Amino acid sequence: MEVVILAAGKGTRMNSSSPKVLHEIGGRPMLSHVIRIALELEPDKIHIVVGYGADQVATKIEDEFPDVPVNWVTQSEQLGTGHALQQALPDINTDSDENPVLVLFGDVPLIRKETLSAMLLEPQADELSLLTFEASPPAGFGRIIRDSDAAVTAIIEERDASAAQKL
């Protein structure tokens, strides 16, 4: 299994010049919490996509996790979540159907190993699993668009969502 952690965002909602993923919770950067959970899953490789404050993020994480090999991927332009993941694709082993790829967000530090393990173990008819949540209020977040059967039809950044999709 390979893990891709998306950590390129500026964090406009944080009202800070520090990279979003370096804001601390419990005395540690949010990204550090996500890396610790990823390591508990024993991945073969960890890719971290950085953008805003890339050098600052890499320095902090390399200091905290000196023995963890990380493949640092740069998203030069912040063009959304999908684009960030695309930047990591060339470095991911796609030669095997037996190599799951878990995508995590560097600014979601409260995800639990048990939640991720359960999702990874759940048999899937399709090749994609998506773990979502409902934010209340949803302002500032992207949107998961579903059809009448609750199947995901689109993932839209908030700035691209219509007024109806923002509700």
Image: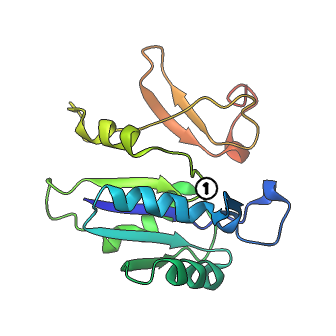
Which residue appears at 41% of the width and 62% of the height?
Answer: 4
Which residue appears at 48% of the width and 20% of the height?
Answer: 147
13 relative to 68, above or below: above
Residue 18 image point, x, y percent: 76, 72
- 129 left or right of 29 in image: left
**Can residue 85 be seen by looking at this rendering?**
no
- 81 left or right of 24 in image: left
* Colouring rule applied to residues: rainbow
Q: Quadrant of residue 144?
A: top right
Which residue appears at 54% of the width and 77% of the height?
Answer: 61
Label 1 element class: loop
Residue 20 image point, x, y percent: 70, 64
Q: Nearer the viewer, residue 97 or 38?
A: 38
Q: Quadrant of residue 36?
A: bottom left
Q: Amino acid at mark 1?
A: Asp
**To which residue does mark 1 refer?**
107
Looking at the image, the residue that sits furthest to the top is 148
- 157 left or right of 4 in image: right
Looking at the image, the residue that sits furthest to the front is 27
Instruction: Assess disc 1: are there few (<14), some (14-19) or many (≥20) residues with their C-alpha within 10 Å of its C-alpha.
Output: many
